[in-house]
Image (cartoon, rainbow, N blue to C red):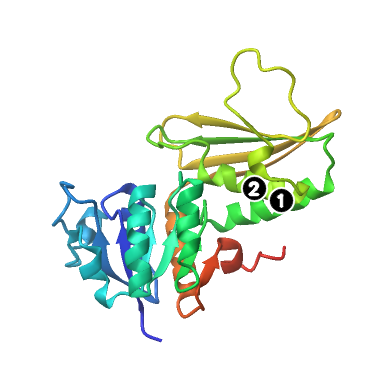
Amino acid sequence: MSDMRLIVAGAGGRMGRALVRAIAESKGAVLAGALEAPGSDLLGKDAGVLAGLPANGIKLSADLWAMSKDADGILDFTVPAATIANLAIAAERGLVHVIGTTGLSGSDNAVIKSVTNRAVVVQSGNMSLGVNLLAAVVKRVAKALDQSFDIEIVETHHRMKVDAPSGTALMLGQAAASGRGVTLDEHSERGRDGITGARRPGNIGFASLRGGTVAGDHSVTFLGPFERLTLSHQAEDRMLFAHGALKAALWAHGKAPGHYSMADVLGLADF
């Protein structure tokens, strides 16, 4: 099979530049396009140069329809509105759409799932191998421990992150809720402040820290009578997410239409 031709959405951003580097460093994929928001000062810039590489001749453009004509997939770590706009074109073109965007609403996710009867979408709040293994373990531990163990999730990210809790924290919360056999929407606590009253048994708590340049730290603590168990993951460089997204795209190339996760990519769906 020839190299997979990939478009990087948000190619001028930190994650977009990491994705451009990951493609350049890996076998089996080539950069076919670099998408940036309309009006960006970076339009027309060389994607390779922006990523700290030699010039590659791929200029940042806001025209996804044109650049997707000869592409096989799109790596999308942007913002919800951009991802939903990209989704329609990706589905129309038959592109593999790898979505790492966080902060998506319930209605956004419903729109994403609505195209998966005819399109291949791989979506995850985190593309790293370690985090997805962590989620699988969290699900097993939550299933094994009863409600005498409270569950608290703490995440830390750089000061520029705009959504909270992080998509990874929510993914871990969903894993814990699934292990407990409950819905996260009905069993979560966020943003405690003031006189909150006692903690409600069975709920999953979230706390978000922001500052510095942290790529992403996450911990899930099970607090029981006289003992605590903490499972954690620290991301040292966002390149790990870029390589995970690239792995997802290559795995999905040629797959039947559907909505897939990193658990599917890594063979963890039944773990």
Q: In the picture, residue 63 is in which quadrant?
A: bottom left
Q: Amino acid at mark 1?
A: Ser
Q: Residue at x 16, y 54 (%)?
A: 43
The residue singled out by tag 1 in the image is 178
Measured as percent of width and height from the top left, residue 99 is found at: 44, 58
Measured as percent of width and height from the top left, residue 75 is found at: 38, 62
Measured as percent of width and height from the top left, residue 24 is found at: 32, 67
Q: In the picture, residue 242 is in which quadrant?
A: bottom left
Regarding residue 26, the answer to whether it shows in the image is: yes
Q: Residue at x 45, y 57 (%)?
A: 111
State the quadrant of the N terminus.
bottom left
User: Viewed as shown, does residue 242 lie left or right of 43?
Assistant: right
Marking on residue 174: 2
Binning the other alpha carbons within 10 Å of mark 1 as few (below 14), some (14 to 19) or many (20 upward) gives some
Residue 98 vertical placement versus 201 (above, below): below
User: Viewed as shown, does residue 144 lie left or right of 176?
Assistant: right
